[in-house]
Amino acid sequence: MSTQPRRTWLPFLNADIPAACDTPAKTAAFELELGCKTLGIEAPALQVMPDMGESYEIKDGVITGGERGVLYGVYAWLCAKAAGEEPPAGPQKPFYALRMLNCWDNADGTVERGYAGRSLWFEDGRLDWDGPRIRQLGRMLSSAGVNVLCVNNVNVRADAALLIEDEGLPELARLAAEFRRFGVRLMTSIEFSRPLAHGISTADPLDGEVQRFWRERADAVWAAIPDFAGFLVKADSEHRPGPFTYGRTHAEGANMLARAIKPHGGVLVWRAFVYNCMQDWRDTSTDRPKAAYETYAQLDGQFDDNVILQVKNGPFDFQVREPVSPTFYAMPNTRLALEVQLAQEYTGQQIDLYAMPPMWKELAQALPPETVSAVAAVSNLGRDDNYTGHPFAAVNLYGFGRFAWDPQSDPEAVTRRWARLSYRLPAAQEDALVDLLMHSREVYEKYTAPLGLCWMVNPHNHYGPNPSGYEYDLWGTYHKASRDAVGIDRTASGTGYLEQYPEALRAQYATPEACPDNLKLFFHRLRYDYRMADGRTLIQRIYDDHFEGCAAAEAMGEALKSLEIPEPDRAEALERMEKQIKNAREWRDVVNTFFHRLSGAEDEKGRKIYD
């Protein structure tokens, strides 16, 4: 692993952090001196007030904050100065106390759904990392506002289960020390059935021996890492073990683990991604988006106070377009975390551009920030030189941190700050880059899945179009396109999914006329000759979107060529844009041909659709 500095949004901070900087406050002093020297500016004073925690204030030439807050304040001040902007005024504090990255890294060095290279800290079944790169990553996370890193895959495999065992804890503690200096705490995913590997005959959460096992493990973990954040659990999902095996509820399973770690101040994050992954496509009574609500809404108020139920932003699985999961509205007496995916599994895989800050603004508008108590994101990190595969995918990592700090942050301002810090382009070119990124999600959506349809991707690798790829599979991912109509009726007269929402939202989606265009086929089954509000037929809208989306991708490519992005980022971005344009053309032609063959409807504009 190379130790050369890598391009980030912190180009003025590229020296390694000395070992003496073993706390966030010491790191803050070092970073401030280094940053001011690089930028050629005078440094403000620092004042640490431990009772301020993660809060800070910049006032009268002094950055004041808690042990971690003063570091956030230094990064905020330096980034503002580097960007030619004013530092934030008045007291600053994060909206969410837990702002976490979920890393799907495996102990063998692979990353599940990873599109930026191998793991930054695993190789050959053990923890193995390059110190300068990890410390540079710590800078990146802290400067964005991320404060918890769950280092291993939620699908706990093989040697990753040893992280919390006696043989794995010393190295985990050393990794925790690297991130501690940046105010980033570690968390690990654990396997619910781990007691079975220790000669215990059951993993029943109500069994006394099982409870004792987890208490002892918790004692050992926190003895090695006193500021350890907690455990993350995926249970009873996609063949993972869980409490259902023993006839117990998920509240009983989560509470058992939460009580084992509560004396140490730990939190138990329990993923709500539970559904029938062995569904018969002939079964029209089962609708996968209903699953999380049906499993958890009835358990509201039954989880202990150090349990956080982590719910995906939509009811499916990080699709191009989904409504907000109704589970968020159904559990006012449960601590909830919003889970999003930076790794672009279904949104271009860090090849196609898909800047996410606008999506998070939509989430904040649809889901009042106080509805949830934490936010988490599936990481887009890897060992590639630029950390995120596509150099512009870094805007999603940075943007997530800013959203987690302030869910009301302006997506364009965040995107512009990232672009300005990363590249220092002339004003017109900066505008062009920001415009390209801000519209990238809209472009991707147009040339891929139309009007709220999901799962039109190639099975397994999830890149590129395959409208029938999952249509007769086990995963409950159907669009049921026929010669006459497409989409799922999820109203009361259909699957009933819409009934899981509060009344105001039910009214918003209840009829095709009321439902926003971008979710029409998620909530309704419509004939191809259905007239949209603008007078076009549904089938014509599908054709138009795909032709327009592909043309927009081609225009993005031309715009990118005109930008003076520094090397090697420019070459990397242009290479990936070529792949994106090829992908957009494939989506356009495959989807349009698919619906043309079903409907028999011609394109009113006479464009090429293949027979």
Image (cartoon, rainbow, N blue to C red):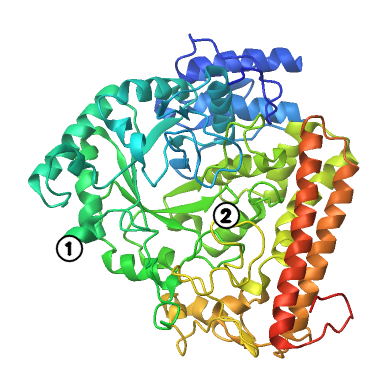
Q: Quadrant of residue 583?
A: bottom right
Q: Quadrant of the N terminus?
A: top right
Residue 66 in picture, x, y percent from top left: 46, 26
Q: Residue at x 40, y 32 (%)?
A: 186
Seen from the viewer's position, the closer of residues 257 and 467 is 467
Q: Specify whether residue 543 is in view.
A: yes
**Earlier sequence position, callout 2 versus callout 1:** 1
- Residue 174, placed above or below residue 156: above
Residue 401 point in image, percent of width and height: 56, 41
Indicate left or right for 227 with 454 as reference. Answer: left
Depicted 72 relative to depicted 607: above or below: above
Give the structural element (helix, strand or loop) at label 1.
loop
Asked if residue 225 can be seen in this view, the reply is no
Q: CA distance from mark 2 to mark 1?
A: 34 Å
Q: Amino acid at mark 2?
A: Asn
Q: Nearer the viewer, residue 434 or 343?
A: 343
Furthest toward the left, the residue is 208
Picture coordinates of residue 225, whole percent (x, y) = 32, 25
Q: Which mark is residue 326?
A: none
Give the x, y percent position of residue 52: 44, 29
Task: Classify residue 256 as left or right of residue 600.
Answer: left
The residue where tag 1 is placed is 247
Q: How many marks?
A: 2
Mark 2 against mark 1, which lies toward the viewer? 2
Check disc 2 and report the residue beneath it.
Answer: 461
Q: Which amino acid does the dot numbered 1 rest on?
A: Gly
Q: Secondary structure at mark 2?
A: loop
Mark 1 crowd level (few <14, some 14–19, many ≥20, 10 Å Cα): few
